């Protein structure tokens, strides 16, 4: 019986050693199987805990977290790149739309030169087609709520309509008295006039950049006005009136940002139709004249306005102001290529000075352009 107890105790010790990972060399084996001394008390040693696998498991968890973090960073990078690419595409589309609007506006001179009508009939016919084109645009933009769109114009919108009507009529009248280049170069001072009027009426500060641009533009206009034999007082005065009317319109829209330009511009053409109908000689309008008037009203005003409205939402106002200078540059080019209308050297030099002034002023405090 004693032998059995000794064998059982030795077996327990051997099992403990094996389960705890203790190496069983010869000495350990003999100690485990050696019979106890007489009178010795057998005490079972406490089991040591099994070596835990926690470090390995934790390492695996950390790896998974790092992988997930890298995955999130990768997704964030892809998303940021996609957003940047889409923003770049939107800017390019905006620049293209605004440039096309400027090209459309620049055709006014060459199209007007094709007409064989008096000034009042030109203004009336152009306004008819422009009003129809803008009415269609309002219907599309406001999803058929045309009446609500015109009701929302308000007093400020009516004032804008009067300004645009004045500018449009004066612009066509000026083209009948002087060269296209001269009209466009004088009209280009409108942003500087707007800045000056905003200072007087709204208290907007005028930066040194704007003051320098104004002085430079005045010098350019002085050069053009000094060019002999190219224009007359009526033509230059009408061109300046158009520039002043546009400047007032800009100040009104700065004062009241809620003015909807599309209905207001459409109303401006309706005003021209009503005012010039009594003076228009409708019997002299030929089929060719109808085509040219439609091109002026639908293409030059309607399409130009729609392209500008879409493009101006996609790019900064400074870029809008700079890109629309294409009108001033391209307008004289079209009549030169198509009709061999060559402005004088003084007009070209003065126009270049005005364009430089507009670039300086637009890069500092751009003013929103308006359709002619």
Image (cartoon, helix red, strand yellow):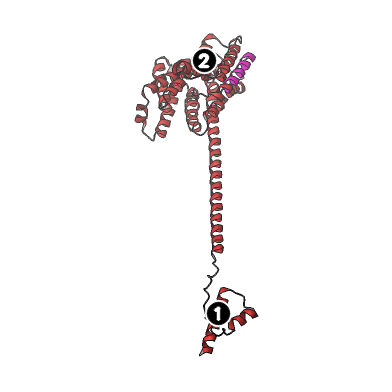
Horizontal side, residue 304 vs residue 330: left or right: left
In the picture shown, does residue 97 fall above or below 27? above
Instruction: Name the residue that disc number 2 marks.
Output: 239
From the top left corner, tell me how far across and down residue 134 is, in percent: 43, 28
Element at label 2: helix
From the top left corner, tell me how far across and down residue 89 is, in percent: 55, 39
Say few, some or many: other residues with alpha carbon within 10 Å of mark 1 (under 14 / 14 to 19 / 20 or more). some
Depth order, front residue of 73/196: 73
Question: Residue 13, labelled with which disc?
Answer: 1
In the picture shown, does residue 19 fall above or below 123? below
Dominant SS of magenta comes to: helix
Element at label 1: helix
Estimate the spatial distance between the alpha carbons at disc 1 and disc 2, rounded to whole Å.
114 Å
Q: State which region is magenta.
A: 344-359
Does the magenta-highlighted stretch encompass residue 262? no
Of tags 1 and 2, the one toward the viewer is: 1
Residue 185 seen in the figure: no
Q: Residue at 53% of width from left, 42% of height from top? A: 83
Does the magenta-highlighted stretch encompass residue 353? yes
Depth order, front residue of 371/11: 11
């Amino acid at each position: 019986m004693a032998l059995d107890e000794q064998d059982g105790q030795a077996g327990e010790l051997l099992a403990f050693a094996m389960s705890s990972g203790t190496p069983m060399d010869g000495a350990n084996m003999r100690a485990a199987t050696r019979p106890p001394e007489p009178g010795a008390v057998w005490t079972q040693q406490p089991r040591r805990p099994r070596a835990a696998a926690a470090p390995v498991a934790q390492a695996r968890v950390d790896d998974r977290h790092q992988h997930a973090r890298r995955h999130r960073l990768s997704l964030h990078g892809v998303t940021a790149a996609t957003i940047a690419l889409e923003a770049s595409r939107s800017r390019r589309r905006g620049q293209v739309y605004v440039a096309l609007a400027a090209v459309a506006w620049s055709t006014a001179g060459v199209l007007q030169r094709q007409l064989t009508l008096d000034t009042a009939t030109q203004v009336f016919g152009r306004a008819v087609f422009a009003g129809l084109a803008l009415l269609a645009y309002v219907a599309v933009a406001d999803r058929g709520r045309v009446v609500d769109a015109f009701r929302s114009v308000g007093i400020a919108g009516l004032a804008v309509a009067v300004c645009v009507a004045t500018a449009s009529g004066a612009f066509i009248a000026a083209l009948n008295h002087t060269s296209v280049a001269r009209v466009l170069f004088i009209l280009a001072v409108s942003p500087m006039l707007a800045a000056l009027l905003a200072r007087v009426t709204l208290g907007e500060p005028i930066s040194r950049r704007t003051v320098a641009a104004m002085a430079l533009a005045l010098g350019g206009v002085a050069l053009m006005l000094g060019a002999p034999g190219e224009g007359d007082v009526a033509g230059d005065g009408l061109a300046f009136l158009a520039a002043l009317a546009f400047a007032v319109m800009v100040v009104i829209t700065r004062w009241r940002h809620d003015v909807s330009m599309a209905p207001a511009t459409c109303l401006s053409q309706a005003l021209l139709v009503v005012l010039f109908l009594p003076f228009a000689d409708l019997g002299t309008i030929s089929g060719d004249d109808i085509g040219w008037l439609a091109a002026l009203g639908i293409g030059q005003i309607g399409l130009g306005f729609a392209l500008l409205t879409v493009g101006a939402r996609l790019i900064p106002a400074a870029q809008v102001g700079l890109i629309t200078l294409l009108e001033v540059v391209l307008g004289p080019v079209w009549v030169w290529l198509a009709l061999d209308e060559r402005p004088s050297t003084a007009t070209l030099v003065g126009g270049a000075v005005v364009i430089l002034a507009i670039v300086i002023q637009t890069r500092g405090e751009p003013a929103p352009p308006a359709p002619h």
